[in-house]
Amino acid sequence: MPLLIGCCTVVFLVSCSSHNTGEQVQVPIEPVNCIVVLPATTSVDTAEDAINYDKARSLEKGAAYATFIMEGELDGRENVRILTSNQLSTLVPEISGGITGTAAALGEKLNCAAILSTTVRKFREREGSEYASEWPAAVEFSMVLMHAASGRTLWYGDYREAQKSFLSNIFSLNNVKKRGFKWVTAEQLMEQAIKERLTESPYLQ
């Protein structure tokens, strides 16, 4: 009996559930000669009046880590051009029109048909250990592959998850097993999510 109680306690405390949207715009695949990958940027909920210093730092950390993961996954591909922040500033020091204007300028200068941008909206670290978390990790981001010349969206993927106990959502057993019945870190959530999204894009196969 003590063994059974112990096992149940572990399942209750360390299991987790996914709130993974993964919605994508389904459009016909259009051939592109190459893709420019921009460093990840940050954003906050527009309903918020302000963002505090700690949250801003967390978002910057999340964006830096997202950029690191994308570089590791996409570096070396013949049709992908990865830009650093310094390279981006050099290529488009002053540009109007937001991301659309940036995409058009980069497409023309680098002779690439598509631009991949990533925006991190939440990056919250867990508080506690992998077996007993007082505050679980949470990650939210979106990825947009844009046609440089027209500004049209070729592909879109997003991800949003805050871990919960297994008993809060029993339909997430696959994620629970994959993570070994542990509370994972925000970095682990981000890495898994980005890899999944990249494999789902028909332009990055």
Image: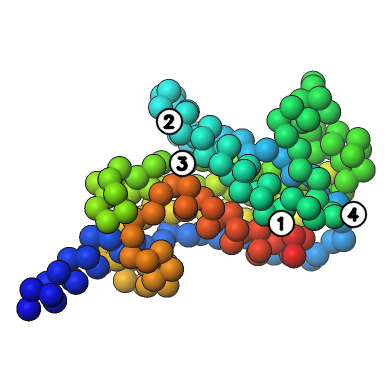
Q: Earlier in the sequence, mark 3 or mark 1?
A: 3
Q: Earlier in the sequence, mark 1 or mark 2?
A: 2
> 19 or 84, which is in the foreground?
84
Q: Quadrant of residue 77?
A: bottom right
Q: Quadrant of residue 99?
A: top right
Q: Is residue 54 above or below residue 177?
A: above
Q: Quadrant of residue 155?
A: bottom right
Residue ID for mark 1: 155
Secondary-structure class at tag 4: loop
Residue ID for mark 2: 55
Quadrant holding the N terminus: bottom left
- Structural distance between the alpha carbons of marks 2 and 3: 8 Å
- Structural distance between the alpha carbons of marks 4 and 1: 15 Å
Residue ID for mark 3: 123
Q: Is residue 195 visible?
A: yes
Residue 71 at x, y percent in the picture = 68, 47
Secondary-structure class at tag 3: strand
Specify whether 162 is left or right of 100. Answer: left
Secondary-structure class at tag 2: helix
Q: Nearer the viewer, mark 4 or mark 1?
A: 4
**Amino acid type of the residue tagged 1 in the rendering:** Trp
